[in-house]
Amino acid sequence: MSNMTIIYPSHTGYPAMTSNTSKPLKRGGSGKRIPSTDRPSARTRSQRAGRKPRDVGTSIASVSSTQAKASFRELIQQAKRSPVFVTVHKKREAVVMSVDDYEQLLANQRDPLADMAEHFDAMVARMQTAEHAAAVDALFNATPEELGEAAVLAANNG
């Protein structure tokens, strides 16, 4: 067990590591795992999800997860004053904030269903014209032959 290799699934973003070296491993052409120093660092969650990382909170304090665990009471006190980033391997992984800040954040969010209802109501209001009413009447009074001709026209123009 002097050279134990730990392999993580590729979707986790963790590199393969050996117990006797701290360098990431990669597969060579023969499939053999070889140490690599040129492997890019693991991607962040936002990069894996296809989002660009936002440059937010540059003035917000950061603490490592180890520091956060060792002095949790102080972290809570600091978070009551302003949000604090918790980092893992120098990457932001979480934000600790006061309950008041969290409730304000929730209160400022818009309801997506209300946004859709507002958009739909505005669209229906725009369609309440004499021209649209005549078109609906013509549609419901059309013969099957007229509907067929309209469908062919729409398919050819569409």
Image (spheres, helix red, strand yellow):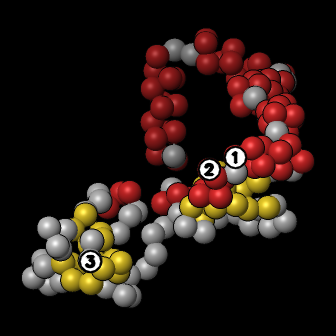
Please, what is the three-letter code of the amino acid marked with disc 1? Answer: Phe
Please, what is the three-letter code of the amino acid marked with disc 2? Answer: Lys
User: Where residue 89 appears, x then y in whole percent?
Assistant: 55, 67
Which residue is the site of mark 1? 72
Q: At x 38% / y 57%, what residue is drawn? A: 12
Q: At x 13% / y 79%, what residue is drawn? A: 32
Q: Nearer the viewer, residue 115 or 70?
A: 70
Q: At x 77% / y 25%, what residue is drawn? A: 114
Which residue is the site of mark 2? 69
- Indicate the quadrant containing the N terminus: top left, top right, bottom left or bottom right: bottom left
Residue 37 sits in which quadrant?
A: bottom left
Relative side of 138 to 43, left or right: right
Cα gap from disc 3 to disc 1, whole angstroms: 33 Å
Mark drawn on residue 20 = 3
Cα gap from disc 2 to disc 1, whole angstroms: 5 Å
Q: Disc 2 vs disc 1: Cβ atoms closer than 8 Å? A: yes
At label 3, counting other C-alpha atoms closer than 10 Å, the crowd grade (few under 14, some 14-19, many 20 or more) is: few
At label 2, counting other C-alpha atoms closer than 10 Å, the crowd grade (few under 14, some 14-19, many 20 or more) is: few
User: Where residue 52 appears, x then y in whole percent?
Assistant: 62, 65
